[in-house]
Image: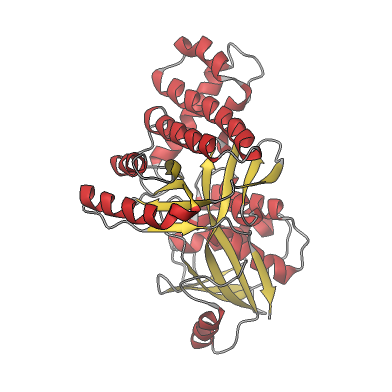
Amino acid sequence: MSTKISMIGETSLDLRFFQLFGSAPRLYGHAPGRVNLLGEHVDYNQGVVLPAAIDRQVCLAAAPTRERMVTLHALDLDQRISFSLDDLEKRQDLDGLPLSSWAQYPAGVAWALQEAGLAVQGMQAVYTSDVPIGAGLSSSAAVEVAFAAAWRLLGGWKTSGLALAQLCQRAENAYVGVSSGLMDQFASACGVRDHLLYFDTRSLEHRPLPLPRGTAIVIADSGVRRTLATSAYNERRQACEEAVRLLGKYKPGLQSLRDITSVELAAYAQELPEIPRKRAEHVTKEILRVEQAVSALEHQDARQLGALMYSTHRSLRDLYEVSCPELDLLVQITRDIPGCYGARLTGAGFGGCTVNLVEREAAESFTRLLHDEYLRQTGRDTAIYVCQAADGASAHKL
């Protein structure tokens, strides 16, 4: 996959880097966003997921420095910040001010890499992204993985994509303070063109599975923004942990909701408060849906895969309660559009995007019809992207 992105290419990054730092960059890096077809809110429950990296990405140009300092310029925000690699735990810039939220992600990656004993070099960098922020497409994970790939190149480490993803997850969990699972960083680091990624978040087993022939992934942005590090996300994770604790009284050795089937859960349902029960029901059934989806993919059965996506959306709406009226409407509209196999919300929820599995030949008409009907019913001029499953992160020197 090209390391250029639609908003700005390497030539433009060259120019902006020179304008800002007075010299040419020495390396380029990129990392894609991701969409998850099935397996939502199960990665932090040690479940299995089916994400894909997409051809929307973070792209950076950088040069190493001799100083133990990092200077970043976020082109899309037109903001610049510098911080020391020796004082990362303070979460402050060189003026002693708290790091901006956007800067915490690359700073957190540097912190996690150093905590793991890896040598992190000072750098100057500019970066840009065409991954929509707050849309559930893992824009923050793409930033983390892009910088991790750049530092890996500078350091000459032999770190695998999976290991790099784990370090980026640690940055987001321990440094930024967001209790995310590993799926987002894994998909960004390890994506395979034209494939979904089967990823077992417990065993870390993973393998690519080809998308059904003749299909396209279409992402529709509801226009409703949400912040991942909100109480609602963490509350659902806590409810799952509470369910495990309560169910452990009846099933000794239970470590996560991965360890109980939906049939077993139904037998103990009366022992759980309503909220933990509903969250657990979604997780156990969603893990089963992923396994059913693997069979559908192995048989190139787009219709079955699409039906599972619709089922997942209902579960996310009714049991996990992370949908919103705009997402529900986007999914409902697709049922009347020819060529659509399935649709559901993707990402943490509370806004953001839907993912749609569509006949490739119908993608253009699908996009137009979905846009027009959503606009008619809501007055929102939504952005819709026809995407390709893409390769994962990389970096190269000039």
Q: Is residue 87 visible?
A: no
> Is residue 120 found left or right of 102 in the rendered image?
right
- Quarter in which the C terminus is drawn: bottom right
Where's residue 241, x and y in %?
52, 28
Position of 122 relative to 146 (above/below): below
Residue 315 in the image, given as x and y percentages of width and height = 43, 30
**Residue 80's spot in the image, x, y percent?**
45, 74
Above or below residue 175? Residue 96 is below
Residue at image position (66%, 38%) is: 298
Q: Nearer the viewer, residue 269 or 303?
A: 303
User: Residue drawn 31% across and 54% down?
Assistant: 371
Please indicate whether residue 1 sits to the left or right of residue 96 in the image.
right
Residue at (55, 51) in percent of width and height: 214
In the image, what residue occupies the spot 57% across and 32% down?
45
Which residue is the extreme one toward the bottom?
A: 22
Pick whichever, 381 or 49, lies toward us: 381
Of residues 393 and 273, the one nearer the viewer is 393
Q: Position of residue 207 (x, y in %)?
A: 70, 45
Q: How many marks?
A: 0
Res. 227 visible in picture:
yes
Horizontal side of 229 relative to 264 (left or right) equals: left
